[in-house]
Structures are given as C-alpha cells and as structure tokens.
Amino acid sequence: MNARFSAYSAALGAVLVAAIIGACSGGDSSGDSTSAAASRTPSSVSNAAASANPMDVVTWHNDIARTGQQLAETILTPANVRSSTFGKLGFFSVDGLVDAEPLFLANVSIAGGTHNVLYVATENASVYAFDADNGTVLWKVSTLGSGESPSDDHGCTQITPKIGITATPVIDRSRGPNGAMYVVGMSKDGAGGYHQRIHALDVTTGAELFNGPTEIRATYPGNGAGSQNGTLTFDPGQYAERASLLLLRGSVYTAWTSHCDFMPYTGWVIGYDANTLQQSSVLNVTPNGQMGSIWMSGAGPASDGEAIFLLDANGTFDVTQNEHEMPIHGDHGNGFLRINLAPLRVQDYFQPSNTVQESNQDEDLGSGGAMVLPDFTDANGIVRHLAIGAGKNGVIYVVNRFSLGKFDSNGDHIYQELVGRIRGPMFGSPAYFNNTVYFGAVGDSIKAFTISNAALSGTPTSQTRESFGFPGATPGISANGTTNGILWAAENGAVGVLRAYDATNLDFELYSSNDAGARDQFGQGNKFITPMIANGKVYVGTRTGVAVFGLLSN
C-alpha cells in the first residue's frame, strides 16, 4: 500500500467492443500475430456488467476496460460547455463521504414511474437511489446489520473518520427481477467485531436479493503474514475494500487493501457468484510473503473480457524464479498482474527490474490502476493487444496482455516504457478516447499521448495549463461516438473544482467551476473522485453529497 500516503496530502461503447473484448490466446514477448487475433471468438459484453441503455454507467470508469468513456453523450459539446451556458444545477446531499463513483441507469421503472436514476454509496454505509434529474430520493437503504455501525478508521487517515461503503459498486440490469447492484459494506458490531459483506440490491427497491448479504470469509494455503499452520485466513477487520468491484463472466470480484501499512496483511482477490452470492474463487498474490495489497486509489481491476489486470502494491516478490519464470513461492508484490479465471490464478506478470527497491521505498505500482487498450495494428501489420498503467515512480508501462514481460534484474522487457514523461506519482488511472491516452499525475498537468502504429507518442501531444495537486486526477471522457470529445477532471482541495477540456487539445480549457465565482462551487474536494457523465449532466462525488452540473437552460 502506501505508508507515505498522507505525505502526498456498463458496458463498453459499441465502437470499441470488438477491439477490447475477445477470447484469449497465447503470444510471444512482442505481441500476438494477426492470425492469432483473427482466430478469436468475441465474448459477450453482458458477461461483464449488463446494461439495457447505452447511456447507463454500471461500473467504475464506464466499462470493464476502465477507459472512462461515455460515448453516448449527445447533449454536452465543446461549444456549449462554457460558463455562460453550463454550470452547477444542484447538489444531492447524503449522510457521509462519497468515495465511490456514482452510477447511473436510464429509464428505470421505479417508485410508480419511469426515472433516470443516480445510485450513490456513502461511508456511512448507506445507498441512495436519486431521481438523477431532480434529486428526489427514490429509496435509501443501509448495509449495516442490526446493532451495527460503520467501521472506525483503525487509526489510519486514508479512509476516515469511518468506513462503510468505499468501493464503487457494479450493476447488472439482467440479474434478479429488476436488476441488481452489488455492494460491499464494512461494519462493526456491538461486541467490537468487524464485518465485510457483499450485498445484491434490487435497483428498483433496494431490497436484498439472492438470500444476501453474504459474509466475506476466505482461507488460502500459505505461510505469509498472519498465517497459522500453513493457512492464511481473511480477517475482515484488517482489510478495506477500496478497489472498485468487477463483474465478469458471472462473478463479482473484490480486491482488498490494508489500513495504511498496518501489519499483518497480504493481497486478496475474492470472487462471488452473481446469482447466488456464494464464493466462487479465492486468490492471494503474496501467500508466502507480506503486503502486496490491491487498492489502486479506488480504480477497479480491468479486464479484456477474459482475464483480470491490476497493479499490485508494495510487497514481497520472489526474485528467484522457477523453470516457467514464475516466483518460486508465488509472491507477486508490486507487480503488473494478469489473473486468469476458473480458478483465479496469476497467469503472467511484469515486475520492474528494481522492484525490491521500489517496495522497500514504498514507490509501488499499486497506487495506480490498470487500463485495457483496444487492439491496434503496428507498422508491420501485427495486431497488438495491450494494457497500460503507472504508479508512484511516474513510469508509464505498456504491456502485451499475453506476455507481460516477467522479471529481469538487469532491465525491463515489456512492450513499451516511457520514463520521465509524467512528472509525479499516479494515484489513479488514465482514460482513453479516440487513439489517445490521458494521464493526470500528482503535481502535473493532465497529458495526452496519442497512439500511432500501436505505440504511445514519446512525448505528450497536448497538456493542460493547470497542474493538479494530490492526488492528481483520474479523467473521464464524454463524446458522441468519436465526436465532441470532452475531458472532465475533478480537482481536489479546500475548494473542489470541476474542469472540462477539449479532448483533442488539452490546452483549450472549456470550463471551470471557478469561472463564475461562487455560483458553481461545491465545497471541499474529495480524493480519487472521477467525474461521471450521463444524459447531459456531470456528477461529482464530494465529502457531503454529489454536485450536479449541466446546461443552465435545463
């Protein structure tokens, strides 16, 4: 995780489905051949997070690839997102911090009518369903059990003062009678015991589905931190669910981090059947070591529809490898991991050549989130299947999803590596739009890198004039297909700021919530928040609710 943290104080758009979702096959260290790519059978996007409307936002950063694209936005354009025509429309108050990204469903039959619905989870362990257009509360439920309260912060300032629902939930409109929203809640009972539970809530009523909730419990073979007699046991009080949930191929995947770096802890990924809430698979990525948590500043594990990709935090990595170049004890701390399913297992990985030093200095990859890129063809006609991410060392890593690069103490062997192009650590994730990747590192401007011949440009092709303090920015994109692209970013601080830029030229700022004085301000900013865009509105989670922006004529 990050001991120095305080010091730094659904579905895919139709144009990308064929490119991002595909069945897996092997490849060499430089990429897959066109013939291998052509042999793939596309997977159903509904296996990830089913959506009945292209406007829906059912998972963190819009899709399982975590691109941050809202490609069905027909109302907001670079021409009308100006302070004279665009601004704050309202504020939906809630009972706690909004650390999870709000989610959105269009045209839901709910509360005796049809509504666009905004779903908001809080650290007070509450879930709200708002009319997304006028702020009416359609329902509100708690994930607490009888006599329980949200968890205390365990003396760690990362999630404070209490911990209820931190991770962004995920929605599947095809599950249950009306659709299901999967939520993980933490609580503390009257006897001082801690609980982590996974809930499936009916999207129209908030009622529990599938005989839920289910207590999150797990064991895994290993002699790592906190083990007894060769077995690791998941301790619900020792962990927080910070990374957003992933719904993939009928299972909901949770990934776990520590409270600060308070020992003992290791790195857990736990899956639950989306129809029954029964545990489907368990993985520990540092079973014979320590640390190696999964938090990614709230980002969700990414997927190409077949495997899971994530950046793991500082922890044990076995520099001695077996004949398959895998760590001899199965410890993958501080790695860029490919996790295969059924059962969960680390199938491949990349470790920086100085990985042990990075972990010792808390300069791990795991502060940032991974993103799956659409497929690109290089100058030799080879189709490349890539993923990308960056962490605290400020290096951009582009990996081949089918041969990540593994470990060599003498140097890195990955598809592409950009050193010194972002000038701060990443506490968040990049976004993708129209052959461009956007990074918002701490203390840096948001920078755009274009993709040509299946490679990122060596230097930014545009960047914002403004720099962003801690924790940087995780941008979101709104567009109508490939046109009218706008990059949105929330700026943290004593006064939070929503900013909008022309996605084709970040030097052109379209709008700032400071432009009109106090009119559009929404109070203190909240870390790790990415703006969510739907149906002509932009929703920004804050410490006390959700600020709603749109065209002032509305």
Image (cartoon, rainbow, N blue to C red):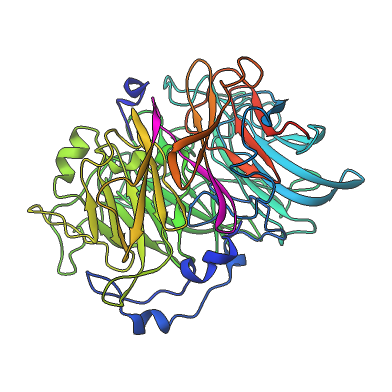
Residue 434 or residue 315, whichever sits in front: 434
Name which residue lies at 58% across and 67% down: 45
The answer to whether residue 351 is left or right of residue 249 is: left
**Above or below, 56 relative to 516:** below
Residue 337 or residue 486, whichever sits in front: 486
Range of the magenta residues? 464-486
Q: Quadrant of the N terminus?
A: top left
Residue 160 or residue 393, whichever sits in front: 393
Report the label total.
0
Q: Where is residue 141 in the image (x, y as percent from the top left)?
A: 74, 35
**Above or below, 50 relative to 530:** below
**Above or below, 4 relative to 303:** above
Q: Where is residue 168 in the image (x, y as percent from the top left)?
A: 57, 42
Residue sitting at the far right: 112
Q: Where is residue 327 in the image (x, y as percent from the top left)?
A: 20, 58
The answer to whether residue 3 is left or right of residue 148 is: left
The answer to whether residue 341 is left or right of residue 486 is: left
In this rendering, does residue 295 appear at all? no
Q: Where is residue 438 in the image (x, y as percent from the top left)?
A: 40, 45
Q: Which quarter of the figure has residue 463? A: top left
Q: Main secondary structure of the magenta part?
A: strand
The answer to if 465 sits in the magenta stretch is: yes
In this rendering, does residue 215 appear at all? yes
Residue 171 or residue 192, whichever sits in front: 171
Name which residue lies at 65% across and 39% down: 80
The answer to if 454 sits in the magenta stretch is: no
Q: Quadrant of the C terminus?
A: top right
Q: Which quarter of the figure has residue 469? A: top left
Name which residue lies at 67% across and 36% down: 120
